[in-house]
Image: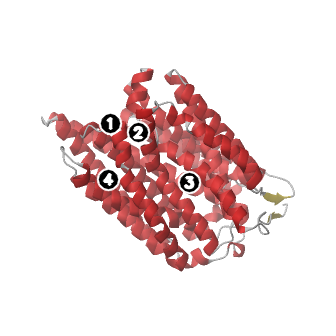
Amino acid sequence: MSQISAAPPMTRGTKEVHRWRAFTVLAVAFFMTIADLAIVNVALPTIGRKLHMAESDLQWVVTGYGLTFGGFLLLGGRAADLLGRRRILLAGLALFTAASLGCGLATAEGLLIAMRFVQGLGAAIVVPAALSIVMNMFPEGAERNRALGAWGATGASGATVGVIAGGLLTRYAGWQYIFFLNVPIGAAALLLAPRVVPESRLATARRRYDPFGAVTVTGGLSLLVYAISTAPQAGWASIRTVTLLAVCAALLVTFLIIEARVEAPLMPLRIFRLRTLAGANAVGLLLGGSFFAFIFIGTLYMQQVLGYSALQAGLAWLAATLTSVAFAGLAQALVTRGSAKLVMAAGMALIGGGVLWATAVPVHGHFWANLAGPFVIVGIGTAFAFIPVSIAALAGVAEQQAGLASGLINTSQQLGGAIGVAVASTIAASRVTTLLHQGTAPAAALTGGFQWAFWACGLIGLAAVPVTFLLVRRSDLARAAAAIRY
């Protein structure tokens, strides 16, 4: 067995300003991929009208992106470790930027949906590569915590800024520009990254790959996202959904068996001996399930019940975004002082509590009276949750596992988002159907469905609080990465 050793970080002798220049480029790339998860939400009605898409097909503009994003993250992270993190980052950026151009130029639903799948694949390559580069540029401790704090704040604001940008661009430029916006940003990142971002990879006598592990985990995760995303339409108890979930389970069990036996596994199962890493991924799953589903259901409530336009719905989320940005500095300061565990628990409690406050929304609601309060509380919660989750997911992880750990935490958040949206949508649809059969007016029935969905989102968020206290260890957050060997 060849000896595997971590290549020393390429930036140890680099001035701090150069590291932060590289970080800025990486954060912009990350922000672009996260914003694209939500940017199409408020534009869907317009896209449907312009491209004459059926309601059942319109969901694939959102689902197609999430399917490949969530399914290929682990593979993207491991590829970055083995083939070179900057090289893989550039490949992902090129793919994402080209697919964004293709989405904007699409004149038929088939091409748009296909390009969204490719966009998701590009994002799955970019995100773990970028985060693992960040981890290796900054030594563990206060400096890395500041970088990961800024990274977490970027993720926290990405989804809500995406909704706002989607509303503005759809109203004043056209739906195509929600995709065209990525082209100059991606092109600039492609030009700057080779100049300012350092390269790093594993130093090995020869590279070993795990093709069977890659196929089974990518297939299993992709099927999981697909099954969950289509379950509200097909039915959770339908033969189709049950079969897909059974095949998914079989593939993931096969993956675990393969990883326990192969010489160079795609995902060494020993990484889960880090209890804090396991806990961070569990919290990340619940964070994605509560927050992304809240954005999805909240946007539907504003558009379908309150009659908000795409622009109005987008601007309404400013309350959450600006609050998240305003509290990011405080969250970083608290985390740096050694309170990451408490900050994480407080953040998830605020997200869950803020969403539960939204369960009181009425049929004839008003932004300031009924939505501003929940949005502000959730905004504070995202600042307090995303930052320590990012730090905890990488605490104590050796350099040679950086891409894997980065892929894991992003996979957890994306899968959580897919599950949360599917569960909330199913609950809302079921409640609406029941109320309509009872003779309730359509607007009141929709409101009742969304209220029940908010209950689900809020409880998912609150479930992360005991998980944080049970699994995340304060000592792990302060342990040096060099002390961990696999």
Between residue 235 and residue 482, name the one nearer to us.
482
Looking at marks 2 and 1 on the same chain, the residue that comes earlier in the sequence is marked by: 2
Distance, label 2 to label 1, CA atoms, is 8 Å
Distance, label 2 to label 4, CA atoms, is 26 Å
Looking at marks 3 and 1 on the same chain, the residue that comes earlier in the sequence is marked by: 1
**Type of amino acid at the residue the image marks with label 4:** Ala
Distance, label 3 to label 1, CA atoms, is 31 Å
**Type of amino acid at the residue the image marks with label 2:** Gly
Tag 2 residue: 167
Q: Count neighbours of disc 4 (C-alpha within 10 A) and say few if under 14, some if 14 to 19, many if 20 or more.
A: many
Residue 448: x and y, percent?
A: 21, 45
Residue 237 is at least partly visible in this image: no
**Which color scheme did the rendering employ for the protein?**
secondary structure
Q: Is residue 461 left or right of residue 330?
A: left
Distance, label 1 to label 4, CA atoms, is 26 Å
Tag 4 residue: 456
User: Mark 2 touching mark 3, by CB under 8 A?
Assistant: no
Tag 1 residue: 309
Q: Residue at x 40, y 63 (%)?
A: 381
Between residue 252 and residue 74, name the one nearer to us.
74
**Type of amino acid at the residue the image marks with label 1:** Ser
Looking at marks 4 and 3 on the same chain, the residue that comes earlier in the sequence is marked by: 3
